[in-house]
Image: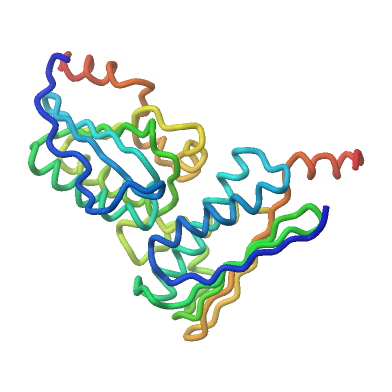
Amino acid sequence: MSENRISLELSSHGANVGVARLTVATFAAQLPFTVAEIEEIKVVVSEAVSNAVIHGYSGEPGHLIRVEAWLADGELGIEVRDQGRGIHDLPAARQAAFSSDPERMGLGFVFMENFSDAIEVESQPGAGTRVVMRKRPQGQTNALASGRM
Amino acid sequence: MAGDRRIISENPQPSGRGVLQLRMEFRAVDQSLVVKLWGDLDLQTADGVRRALEGALEQSKAKDLYLDLSHVTFIDSSGLGMLLGRYKRVMRAGGVMGLINPLPVVRPILELSGLLKLMPVYETEPSILKETEAR
C-alpha cells in the first residue's frame, strides 16, 4: 500500500487530547488493525499528548504540541513532540508509578510501551520532549513471522 | 426499585454534549452511591468527574461507591488515576468501591493497571442492590 502521513499542530489544551487520539485512530484504520489494537493506539496517543500538556507545559494551554502519524511498509508510526520543560530523569520517569501527582498513576509510559511495538523517547530539560512509537497490525506480524507474506 | 432515593444530580459538567464530553447520573441506594457515566475518561474529563464524585459522596454521605462503566468508551491513565483516587477515599472511610460492566474496550487498560485486582467488577447492577439490602 502507498505511504501516507498526517501532521497536527495542537494547542496544549486538554480537549485536544481526545482530538489527537481520534484523528490518529481514524488514520491508523487504513491498516488492518483489530478493534482492540485501535483502542491501544488511542491510549498511546492520549498518554503522549497528555504528558505534553501536563508535564511539558504544566497544564497551561496555548503552547504547541505536534502530532505526526505515518503509514509505511504496513506499519504505523506516531510522533508526539513538545517544546516544554523536558524530562529531568528519563529512566525514572519511564518506570511505573513514578508520578508527581497523587491523582495520576504514573503509568503513561508503561501503557505506551505495552501498547506499541517500539518506543523511543528523547528529552532534554528545558528543550522539550519527543516520543516516537511504532505499531504493526498483529495479523501482519504473525504472517510475516510464519513466512506467509 | 426498592431502596432508591433520588437522583442527586445529572450532568454536573458545564460542558456540552459533543462526542468527547462526559455525562453522569447519580443515584443513592441505602449506603451506596451508584454513578453511571457516559463518555471518555481522560485528561479533559477526569478532573470534572473527580469533583462531581467527591461532591456526591459528601452530599449523599454514602459509604460505598459503584461506578457503572457500561457506557464509558475510553479510559487512559488520567481516568485510572481518578478511579484510584476515589478508591483510596472510599477505602479510608471503610467502604467498598466497585465497577459495573466495564466495556471490553477498556478492560485491557483496567487489567494492566492492576485496578481490577483492587476493585470488584460486577456484570449488572441488581446484584449490587441485593448485596446492599442483605447487609
Q: Residue at x 66, y 51 (%)?
A: A28
Relative depth, front residue between B15 and B5: B15
Q: Residue at x 43, y 46 (%)?
A: B75
* Image quadrant where residue B99 sits: top left
Q: Is residue A114 above or below residue B67?
A: below
What's the coloring here?
rainbow
Q: Position of residue A101 (x, y in %)?
A: 32, 63
Q: Quadrant of the C terminus of chain A?
A: top right
Q: Is residue B27 above or below residue A143?
A: above
* Image quadrant where residue B130 sits: top left
Q: Position of residue B28 (x, y in %)?
A: 14, 29
Q: Position of residue A47 (x, y in %)?
A: 49, 58
Q: Residue at x 41, y 46 (%)?
A: B19
Relative depth, front residue between B10 and B55: B10
Q: Residue at x 56, y 73 (%)?
A: A81
Q: Position of residue B43 (x, y in %)?
A: 37, 57
- In the image: residue A56, left or right of residue B16: right
Relative depth, front residue between A100 and A57: A57
Q: Number of labelled discs?
A: 0
- In the image: residue B52, left or right of residue A80: left
Residue, far bottom: A126
- In the image: residue A20, left or right of residue A133: left
